[in-house]
Amino acid sequence: MKKTLVIIGLALVLTTNYAVAATAGTVNGMEITVDEANKALKVLSKGEKTWKDLPDDGKKQLIQMMAPSKLVAAESKKSLTDKEKEAALAGFWMQKKMEATEISDKDAQAAYDKMKKQATEAKSTQKIPEFEAVKNSIKMQLAQEKVVGVLMKSAKIKVK
């Protein structure tokens, strides 16, 4: 029986296809894989270089460039409270959603005109900046409102 189990085990090991991520380097014992290095190189070299193309000094330089993000990620996992991690994650998610939300110049102009009209009606003495100076801020605000609006539509809020 023992012999049969050993043979089955060896057969599984020899026939199973599994990928082991090759290590490009380490930072404080944290692994940087060749895949991670290639992703960074794709951005840095606009797809012209890969890990295997780099000379040894280039590999060292790339690992040194990638090290800070690994160190920051590890330190943040240790140092941040769960509440701080949640807030950071929520902020990142919101930023990502806002970037993917399209707001036209026409919509931004309409919001600007509405704000300008409200300021005039309120007899505000503050100088109103030109549209082009505030266009991107208005677009960000509208994108945020749009993302929050979508979330609120599907929210099931109960007060107890």
Image (cartoon, helix red, strand yellow):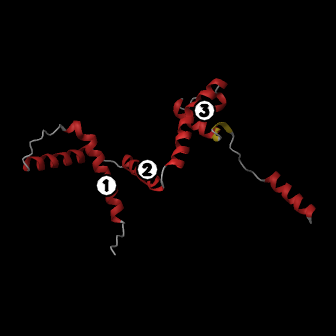
Between the residue at mark 2 and the residue at mark 1, the CA separation in whole angstroms equals 20 Å
Q: Are marks 2 and 3 in contact (CB under 8 Å)?
A: no
Specify the quadrant that holds the N terminus. bottom right
Asked whether, in this view, residue 33 is left or right of residue 5, the answer is left
Residue 104 sits in quarter: top left
Residue 61 sits in quarter: top right
Of mark 2 and mark 3, the one earlier in the sequence is: 3
Q: Position of residue 14 (x, y in %)?
A: 82, 51
Disc number at residue 88? Answer: 2
Q: Amino acid at mark 2?
A: Ala
Specify the quadrant that holds the C terminus. bottom left
- Is disc 2 surrounded by few (<14), some (14 to 19) or many (20+) residues within 10 Å? few
The residue labelled by disc 3 is 63
Q: Amino acid at mark 1?
A: Lys
Q: Residue furthest bottom?
A: 160
Between the residue at mark 1 and the residue at mark 3, the CA separation in whole angstroms equals 40 Å
Marks 2, 1: nearer the viewer: 2
Q: Position of residue 40 (x, y in %)?
A: 55, 35
Q: Is residue 143 visible?
A: yes
Q: Residue at x 24, y 46 (%)?
A: 108
- Is disc 1 surrounded by few (<14), some (14 to 19) or many (20+) residues within 10 Å? some
Give SS at disc 3: helix
Give the camera-side residue of 153 and 26. 26
Q: Residue at x 62, y 32 (%)?
A: 50
Q: Residue at x 31, y 55 (%)?
A: 146
Give the camera-side residue of 134 and 125. 125
Q: Position of residue 153 (x, y in %)?
A: 33, 64
Q: Is residue 55 visible?
A: no
Of mark 2 and mark 1, the one earlier in the sequence is: 2
The residue labelled by disc 1 is 146
